[in-house]
């Protein structure tokens, strides 16, 4: 790959990506590009050879990059894309703003985006994945998003454009989100803060937050996503069917399904991406053999095998 456009941001060649993901695995990208701002990113995409693959990357919280790395330009958004603004009941955030920070800042202004508080990652990934928790989803509060097309045009996207589904949206290939706007109900700031604290305590008591993980490994079987209500039925949660298949604590190399929460895959220290993906496929196979349910990955897996 030669002749990349000149930028005001930073381009690094042959950049190993493992340290940029929560699971700490992955080979090199041909290039890592960190745009300075929206106009820098626009001109880069406009002038980049259309045959070159681009991959927008957030904080790597829901991602396995394979050991062979990526034959692509990885676009990682940072400062310049992490603003958070609250205007009445509307909250506008750059894609690099952490979900937890958006929830906190909104709560301070009396806006209820508390469901975002315990979701790992940043707003760009949350929109792409229609992230959700406690029965609320990005789709429920989404107003619009701004994205840059592969030809460098800045466009505004509606919910209809993104076609939100469970853990999915229809963002066109190669388009890069830069900002999203949400509208949420009002709430008392102290009450919202208390609710978020309770959510954090519940999360820390039930999930391996001190281990290297990427959040939930598999989607809950369709139609049975967690609501967090007291009458919630757990018959067809991903963790339950994994348990029923005897795969809690299962290992491949340095990869393990957590003993604490069996739908969390952890890197115990020296796992490769191949270890993690092999373990995930082993779990899927065992669950299918045991229950006939075909678990779908929630963690995104990209790149080449080593």
Image: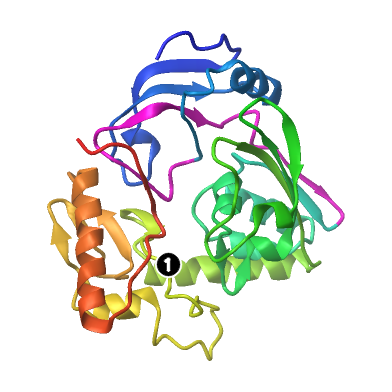
Q: Residue at (42%, 66%) from the top-left corner?
A: 204
The answer to which quarter of the image holds residue 155 is top right
- Of 137 and 222, nearer the camera is 222
Residue 47, placed above or below residue 160 = above
Quadrant of residue 13 within the rendered picture: top left
Magenta span covers which residues?
A: 59-88
Which residue carries the number 1 mark?
219
Res. 137 in view: yes
Query: Picture coordinates of residue 105 (x, y %)?
Result: 70, 51
Q: Check disc 1: other Cα within 10 Å, few if <14, some if 14-19, many if 20+.
A: some
Query: Going by the image, does 151 lie left or right of 306?
Result: right
Give the left or right position of residue 201, taking residue 17 as reference.
Answer: right
Determine the secondary structure under disc 1. Answer: loop
Dividing the image into 4 quarters, which one contains the C terminus? Answer: top left
82 in the magenta segment: yes
Question: Where does residue 244 sit, x and y in percent of width and height?
Answer: 24, 83
Q: Which of 98 and 199 is in front in this view?
A: 98
Residue depicted at 34% across the width and 75% down the height? 239
Q: Where is residue 292 in the image (x, y as percent from the top left)?
A: 28, 80
Instruction: Compare residues 19 and 159 and report the one nearer the observer.
Output: 159
Outermost residue to the bottom: 231
Quarter of the image for residue 290 reads bottom left
- Of all residues shown, which one is farthest toward the front? 51
């Amino acid at each position: 790959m030669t002749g990349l456009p000149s930028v005001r941001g930073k381009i690094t060649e042959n950049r190993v990506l493992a340290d940029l993901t929560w699971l700490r695995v992955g080979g090199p990208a041909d290039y890592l590009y960190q745009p300075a701002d929206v106009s820098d990113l626009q001109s880069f995409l406009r002038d980049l050879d259309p045959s070159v693959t681009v991959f927008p990357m957030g904080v790597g919280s829901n991602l396995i990059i394979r050991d062979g790395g990526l034959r692509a330009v990885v676009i990682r958004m940072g400062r310049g894309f992490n603003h958070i603004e609250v205007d009445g009941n509307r909250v506008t955030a750059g894609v690099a703003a952490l979900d937890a920070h958006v929830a906190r800042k909104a709560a301070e202004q009396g806006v209820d985006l508390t469901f975002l508080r315990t979701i790992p990652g940043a707003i760009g990934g949350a929109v792409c994945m229609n992230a959700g928790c406690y029965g609320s989803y990005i789709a429920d509060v989404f107003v619009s998003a701004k994205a840059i097309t592969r030809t460098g045009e800045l466009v505004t996207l509606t919910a209809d454009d993104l076609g939100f589904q469970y853990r999915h949206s229809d963002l066109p290939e190669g388009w890069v989100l830069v900002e999203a706007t949400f509208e949420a109900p009002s709430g008392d700031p102290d009450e919202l803060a208390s609710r978020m604290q309770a959510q954090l305590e519940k999360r820390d008591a039930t999930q391996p937050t001190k281990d290297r993980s990427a959040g939930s490994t598999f989607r809950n079987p369709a139609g049975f996503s967690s609501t967090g209500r007291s009458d919630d039925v757990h018959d067809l949660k991903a963790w339950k069917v994994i348990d029923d298949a005897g795969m809690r604590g299962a290992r491949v190399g340095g990869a393990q399904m957590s003993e604490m929460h069996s739908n969390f895959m952890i890197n115990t220290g020296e796992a490769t991406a191949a270890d993690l993906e092999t373990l995930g496929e082993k779990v899927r196979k065992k669950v299918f053999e045991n229950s006939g349910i075909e678990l779908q990955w929630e963690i995104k897996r990209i790149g080449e095998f080593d």
